Every structure is written in structure tokens, then in C-alpha cells.
Amino acid sequence: NYVCKFCRKEYYVSSECEKKKYIKIENEIKKSLSPLENRVLQLYLDGNGYMDIARILGKTPKSIDNALRRIRGKIKSYF
């Protein structure tokens, strides 16, 4: 089985080759994100809300919203 780093869901994969494909996509997505976007995504996946992320990173909630919108767009481009 394979656990997605982005959504943390567990998926059944029928082969090691298929698992490697998912890992490759995750790595490509991570490389496509800016350092800020990677940090925002990690905090969001850890269960933090926009206001919490903004406070932690010293940014405005709007900049966090913008970062998450960019992240979603980049992730969608892979599927």
C-alpha cells in the first residue's frame, strides 16, 4: 500500500512500479512548489487553518489563501 504525502490517504497499489510512479509525482509536485508554498502546504496538512498558518509564518491570511490556491492549481496539473 501507499500513503500519499499530500492527502495522507492510503491507496492500494498493485505493483512496486505503480508505487514508484506515485512517489515520482509527489517529488515533482514538491519541486514545483516554492519554499513558502511547501511550508504552507505542510502546515495545512498538519491541520492548521489559514489564520494559524498566517500567524506562524508572519504572513497575512490573504497571502496564505493565495498560496493554497496556487498549490491546488499546481497539484491539479498532475492529475
Image (spheres, rainbow, N blue to C red):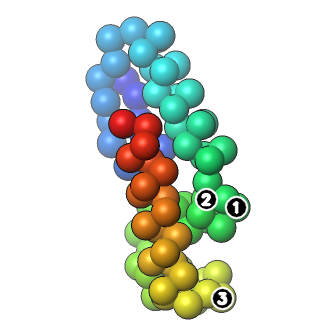
Q: Could you give the CA–CA distance between mark 1 and mark 2, rounded to whole angstroms?
A: 5 Å
- Quadrant of the frame with the C terminus: top left
Q: Is residue 14 left or right of residue 68?
A: left
At x 53%, y 37%, the residue is 26
Q: Where is residue 2 in the image (x, y as percent from the top left)?
A: 40, 28
Name which residue type carries label 1.
Pro
Contact? badges 1 and 2 (CB < 8 Å): yes
Q: Residue 38 carries which label?
A: 2
Residue at horizontal 52 percent and vertical 19 percent from the top:
20
26 up-or-down from 14: above or below: below
Q: Mark 3 points at which residue?
A: 58
Q: How crowded is mark 2: few (under 14 residues within 10 Å), some or many (20 or more)?
A: some
Along the line of sight, the residue nearer the viewer: 46 or 62: 62
Residue shown at 65% from the left, 88% from the top = 58
The answer to whether marks 3 and 2 mark residues whose Cβ atoms lie closer than 8 Å is: no
Question: 56 or 24, which lies in front?
Answer: 24
Specify which label sits upstream in the sequence, 1 or 3. Answer: 1
Question: Can residue 44 be seen here?
Answer: no
Residue 18 in view here = yes
Circle 1 sits on which residue?
35
Q: In this view, does 79 lie above or below 56?
A: above
